[in-house]
Amino acid sequence: MKYHASHILVALVGEKGDLIQRCIALTRLTAIIAAEVDAAGIYWGGGTLVHDPQVFIEQAKTISLGNPPLHLWIDFRVEQNEDGSCRLFTTGLKTFQKMEIEIPHSTKPPAEVLEFAHAIAEYVMTSKKAVREARR
């Protein structure tokens, strides 16, 4: 994206309405605009993610309140620890006034850890119940 000459900023202003519904609308609008221009990438600020425009456009077609596009809004970062285990953390849940997820050490395969964290994030985003921070 270094050599791209311009950008389009698409944003929501105001605070009225359900935040997830507003983000769904923003995602759909962004996908419509991206389909009409020669976009090099789509940056989603809350999750600090850069998406391939075609992937973003295709995934935006399937979203609904019951199927929020968490992978478009939230960065699920899996990294390897020095001991060979993996860790996972999210960026983007805070935008929705939810706690970020952090799994500092797991011996499970990275794909399993990612699937587990995604399920937690989906529950947190779609449930009206509050989730408290785990105490050590």
Image: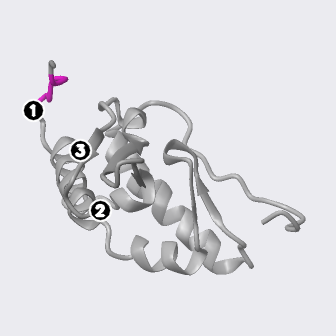
The answer to which of 87 and 18 lies nearer the viewer is: 87
In the rendered image, residue 117, in percent from the top left (x then y), is placed at 23, 51
Q: Is residue 7 left or right of residue 69?
A: right
- Give amino acid for label 1: Lys
Residue highlighted by disc 3: 125
Marking on residue 129: 1
- 35 in magenta: no
In the rendered image, residue 59, in percent from the top left (x then y), is placed at 40, 74
Q: Is residue 60 above or below residue 70?
A: below
Q: Secondary structure at mark 3?
A: helix
* Quadrant assignment for the C terminus: top left
Q: Residue at x 18, y 59 (%)?
A: 66
Residue highlighted by disc 2: 110
Q: Secondary structure at mark 2?
A: helix
Which quarter of the picture shows residue 67?
Answer: bottom left
Q: Is residue 87 visible?
A: yes
Q: Nearer the viewer, mark 2 or mark 3?
A: 2
Q: Can you name the residue that lies furthest to the left here?
A: 129
Q: Residue at x 38, y 61 (%)?
A: 71
In the rendered image, residue 100, in percent from the top left (x then y), is placed at 33, 35
